[in-house]
Amino acid sequence: MTVGRGRTLLLLALLVALASLPLWAPRFWIYIGTQALIFAIFAMSLDLLLGYAGLASFGHAAFYGVGAYACGLLALRHVDALIPLLLIGALASAAVAVPIGALSLRATGIYFLMLTLAFAQILWGLAVNWTSLTRGTDGLIGVPRPALPGAGALGFTLNERGPFFILCLAVAVLVFLLLEALTRSPFGRTLEGIRENERRMRALGFPTFRYRLAVFVVGGAIAGLAGSLAAMSNGFATPDLLYWTVSGLVLVAVVVGGSRSLVGPVLGAFLVLIAQLGLSTFVDRWELVLGALFIAFVLFLPRGLVGLVRRA
């Protein structure tokens, strides 16, 4: 069996297993699966920056939170159409990513990482203090889930956990296919060249800054899409979604799963979310254990879970 065929069969098996979850799993695990799918979309958006473009952002939660707030604000104004609510989160985050990227991408390495962190903390401060819009630390409470055209005639709504889980799975699959096509396109190959040797790509005539800004905006838009789903799923949008710990958690998911592979962030998102749930239940200082797990992966499994699968 070739590697490509084995990868396809593995993805199909994972997809079938996830699609069958609402048929047999308790409601609690359907909820956990929904959160993991949303987090997987968020992790894939960061892997596009980190794995393929070599941009180690530590403020990616900014776009996740902006998407959640944009979706929540529109939903609370009695807009219940699914597509507009998803699009508003992606477009709002993309709009925010343009100036942040234009300024942050003028730096490299640790300086780029710190700039993205600083911008994310600025947005977190705005979310806390702009009470007339964001309602401060309380956040937007009571965000309703959208209506799905024709769902009522079929006897289900997105307020039920099973249908909403299937919606998140469908969006995750579409995002995966979109990013797979993007990374395999000439645009994606150019990003890899810039990651490996930006000076040489610039000498060949490629406008490297524009490419890096474009991928930064695309990653921000997909993170905003995940934020929209998070607001719909949880029914709220709070400043915690923009905080640096969320950026750190999704970075752990990408590294644990394996960067430069869109499957890796998906696996890492599920592992990190389930580990967080289990550790927080039994261990008070679960962050320390999760940090130790992250360090172990960096030292002993630098290619993450995907590296283990490939080796097997």
Image (spheres, grey):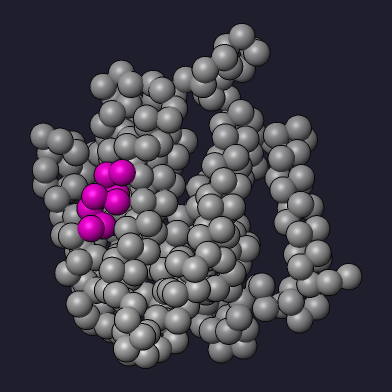
Residue at left offset 70%, top offset 34%: 22
**Residue 253 located left or right of residue 202:** right
Please say if 149 is above or below 39.
above
| x 19%, y 55%: residue | 123
Looking at the rendering, which quadrant does residue 277 occupy?
Answer: bottom right
Q: Could you say which is closer to the camera, residue 252 or residue 260?
A: 260
Range drawn in magenta: 91-98
Give the residue furthest to the front: 205
The quadrant in which the N terminus is found is bottom right
Q: Is residue 152 left or right of residue 130?
A: right
Instruction: State yes or no: residue 94 in magenta.
Output: yes
**Residue 300 seen in render:** yes
The answer to whether residue 105 is left or right of residue 48 is left
Quarter that holds the C terminus: bottom right
User: Dominant secondary structure of the magenta stretch?
Assistant: helix
The x, y position of residue 193, in whole percent, is: 45, 81
Q: Residue at x 24, y 50 (%)?
A: 95
User: What residue is shown at x 41% (from left), y 45% (from top)?
Assistant: 225
| Image height of 166 relative to 177, above or below | above
